[in-house]
Image (tube, rainbow, N blue to C red):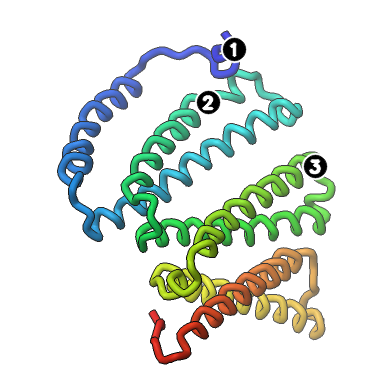
Amino acid sequence: SIYSAMAGTTTFGPGVLESVALLLTGLPLWWYRWVHRWSDDHGPARRAWAILVAVASMIAMIGAAIVLVWNVLTFVFGLTSDRAADHFRFLPQAISFALVGFAAWHHHRGVLGRERTDSVRFYDYLLAAIGLVGLIVMVTILATAVFTSAFLVSEQMEMIVLVTLAGLAALGLWYLYYWNRGQASPREEEAAATPRRLYLLVMGIITAVASAVTLIWFLVMVFQAVLGVGEVSESAVPVVTTFLASGLAAWHLLRTYTLDRRLFDDGVDITP
């Protein structure tokens, strides 16, 4: 009765039957091509596929959980005027995404194993990169919400700030968890690993470029204001915030990359 009140009633229409038919057709094919055919194969194609699917399924699972929590909070705090059945009409899809995402993640993450191999390192550093980008985005959103008048007068200001703070904390824990997994390994062994070097160098360059672009953008705004053809408005807040957050991330990444290289000053080349 609780579920019916939240999600309404439904019938098994053609869409449900098509989904069941697709599941019954696809599941045996997946089992045969993946579980059966690749059960004893540990080649690079299998590992690359497992990494991509594990990461994608984790994002799908967490995304579905975020949608669930967000909609529950907006309903509990009275930030919607919809009826419960209309507000929670997404519930079957979100629960399905969460369950399927968890099942896919659990299987493909298990394929990678628990030892600190390069496959596990690629998985960890890819998720660390996603967490770092998410942190930069969340910091920018929070600064924009706090320091711009458009958000300050919004009726959902408090909710936006609370959700952003929660996202910031969650992404911070996410990033620290996957980053510290590498830090807990022997430094010489981890520093020589290709996944770590690629992560530090590629993400260091990306964040440095993002910081440089936003700095140029801000300077253009300043010069336009000085020349009287524009002004430094509140739109500078996300630009400056992105510059600072990206610059700090770039400094951390490239500094760590440099420190790792110093471990090999005896002549061992670790350049990717």
Asked which secondary structure carries label 3, the reply is helix
Q: Is residue 115 left or right of residue 174?
A: left
Q: Nearer the viewer, residue 271 or 6?
A: 271
Q: Which residue lies under the disc numbered 3?
A: 158
Residue at figure coordinates x 52%, y 77% from the top left: 205
Q: Which residue lies under the disc numbered 2?
A: 91
Quadrant position of the C terminus in the picture: bottom left
Residue at figure coordinates x 80%, y 79% from the top left: 225
Mark sitting earlier along the chain (3/1) = 1
Instruction: Compute the Cα span from label 2 to label 1.
Output: 12 Å
Q: Residues within 10 Å of mark 1 (few under 14, many from 20)?
A: few
Give the percent coordinates (x, y) of residue 137. Answer: 63, 58
Q: Nearer the viewer, residue 213 or 186?
A: 186
Marking on residue 2: 1
Asked which secondary structure carries label 2, the reply is helix
Tell me which amino acid carries mark 1. Ile
Q: Nearer the viewer, residue 109 or 92?
A: 109
Quadrant position of the N terminus in the picture: top right
Residue 231 figure quarter: bottom right
